[in-house]
Amino acid sequence: MRILLTNDDGINAPGLNVLERIARQLSDDIWICAPSEEQSGAGHSLTLTRPIRVREHAPRRFSVTGTPTDAVTMALKKLMPEPPDLVLSGVNRGANLGDDVTYSGTVAAAIESALAGIPSIALSQVYSKEGMADMVPFDVAEDWGRKVLQPLIDAPFAPRTLVNVNFPAVKSSQVKGIRVVRQGFHDYSRGSVVEGTDPRGYKYFWFGLHGIEHTAGHDSDLEAISDGYISVTPLQLDLTHEASLANLRERFA
Ligand code: MN
C-alpha cells in the first residue's frame, strides 16, 4: 500500500513525524509532501499568482512553497510516479471540528486527494487551550492512530467523500473509545479580532481563536471530543443543501 502523507503545519511539524510513525505501522511505501511553512487556516486555497518551488529533503520526502492543496497537487501530478492508495493529512496541531473544517488546511489537503478519487483521511490532535501549542498530546494520536485507521482503510470510500478524525485532549489511557459522529457547529462565528499597536506605532489586527462558544450537538464531533472519545466523521464534498433546492426553484420558476 502506497501512502502519501501531508500536513498543514509544514514539513518540520512534529505532527507529521507522528503521522509518519503511525503510517509506517501500515506500510513501508511512504511518500511525504508538505508545505515548507505553516499553512494553518489556509483552507482549500490553491496558489495561482506565484511559482511553486519544490525541495527534496530525502528520497520520497518533499516540501513545496505553497499551501496544503499545492502540496497534494504537486505530489499527485508531478512528484509521485504512481498515485498513492491512501492519503493521510496531519496529525494537525489542534482541533478541526464542526464548521471549522472549511478553514482547515489539514482537511483541505484530504479534500484535494479525495477529489482525485483517492481514499483520504484528515487527522487532528486537540489540545486543551491556546498558548499550550508546545504541549500538544500527540501521544494520543500515536497510540490510537493505527486502531482508528485500519477499519477506515478496510472500508470502501464513497466517491467524493473523506474522513475527518480528531483525537481528544486527554491522557491516552483515558480515551473512552472511538465514535462515528456527524459534523457539529459552533453557536457563534469564529473568534475575535484582537487589535494592537506594532513597535512602529501602527495599528494591527490579529484573529483570535479562543472563546468559541458551542453547545455540542448530540452525536456531533464536538460532543464526542468533549466526552473524551476519538471522533470519526465522514465528510462529503457536495455542499448542496438538498432541502432548499425545491424552495429556490419555485422562486425562479
Ligand atoms: Mn495546522
Image (cartoon, grey):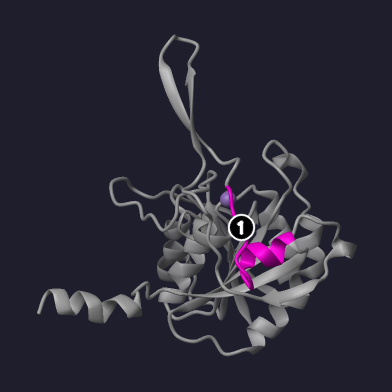
Report which quarter residue 121 is drawn in: bottom right
Residue 220 visible in the shown view: yes
Foreground residue, 12 or 122?
A: 122
Foreground residue, 26 or 168?
A: 168
Decide if residue 65 is on the left or right side of residue 165: left
* Image location of residue 170, percent across then percent down: 81, 56
Foreground residue, 32 or 229?
A: 229
Is 21 placed above or below 63 here?
A: below
Decide if residue 140 is on the left or right side of residue 45: right
Residue 167 visible in the shown view: no
Q: Residues within 10 Å of mark 1 (few under 14, many from 20)?
A: few
Report which quarter residue 120 is drawn in: bottom right
Is 21 placed above or below 206 here?
A: below
* Image location of residue 148, percent across then percent down: 72, 76
- At 42% from the left edge and 49% from the top edge, which residue is drawn? 53
- How many numbered marks does the figure carry? 1
Decide if residue 235 is on the left or right side of residue 126: left
* Image location of residue 194, percent across then percent down: 50, 28
Mark 1 residue element: loop
Amino acid beneath label 1? Thr
Foreground residue, 186 or 61?
A: 186
Is 249 placed above or below 80 here?
A: below
Magenta region: which residues? Answer: 213-226
Name the outermost residue toward the right.
173
- At 70% from the left edge and 84% from the top edge, which residue is drawn? 151
* Residue 244, magenta (yes or no): no
Which residue in the protein does label 1 denote? 215
